[in-house]
Amino acid sequence: MTDVRKVADEADMIINGYAFTQSGEKCRVLNLRHPDKATVFSKNGEVLETSMDDIEIQIVKEYLEKNRKFMEGCNAEIL
């Protein structure tokens, strides 16, 4: 089971209930309200792993694209 509080505390940013965490060359996204929904993006915005549906993936991609300047080192060029 995912420790949601720990993920939230360690997140680089939280937007609308989604925790964004940089992990090396990857950006991990966890839905804090539904911790069974997560996505891992490569640095160029490719989905590497996911348990989210296509609509939710698009939503978090847009959040990341609009706010990536606030994440240190996560300069992914999301298309």
Image (cartoon, rainbow, N blue to C red):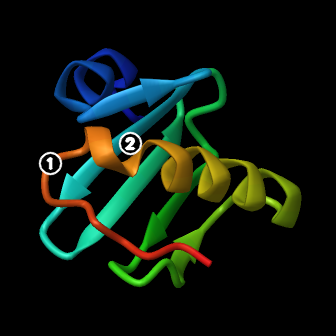
Q: Which amino acid type is marked by label 2?
A: Phe
Depth order, front residue of 15/32: 15
Residue depicted at x 74% and y 49% = 59
- 54 to the left or right of 76: right
Report the quarter where the C terminus lies.
bottom right
Q: Position of residue 46 (x, y in %)?
A: 52, 84
In this view, the residue farthest toward the right is 55
Relative to 53, is 21 above or below?
A: above
**Quarter of the view holding residue 42:** bottom left
Residues under numbered marks 1 and 2 in contact, where contact means CB atoms less than 8 Å apart: no
Q: Secondary structure at mark 1?
A: loop
Q: Secondary structure at mark 2?
A: strand
Residue depicted at x 23% and y 22% = 6
Report the quarter where the N terminus lies.
top left
Residue depicted at x 12% and y 69% = 24
- Label 1 vs label 2: CA separation? 11 Å
Q: Which residue is tagged 1?
A: 72
Q: Which residue is tagged 2?
A: 20
| Marking on residue 57 | none
Q: Residues within 10 Å of mark 2 (few under 14, many from 20)?
A: many
Tell me which label, 1 or 2, sits earlier in the chain.
2
Q: Which amino acid type is marked by label 1?
A: Glu
Q: Position of residue 72 (x, y in %)?
A: 14, 48
Q: Position of residue 21 (x, y in %)?
A: 28, 46
Depth order, front residue of 64/25: 64
- 12 to the left or right of 72: right
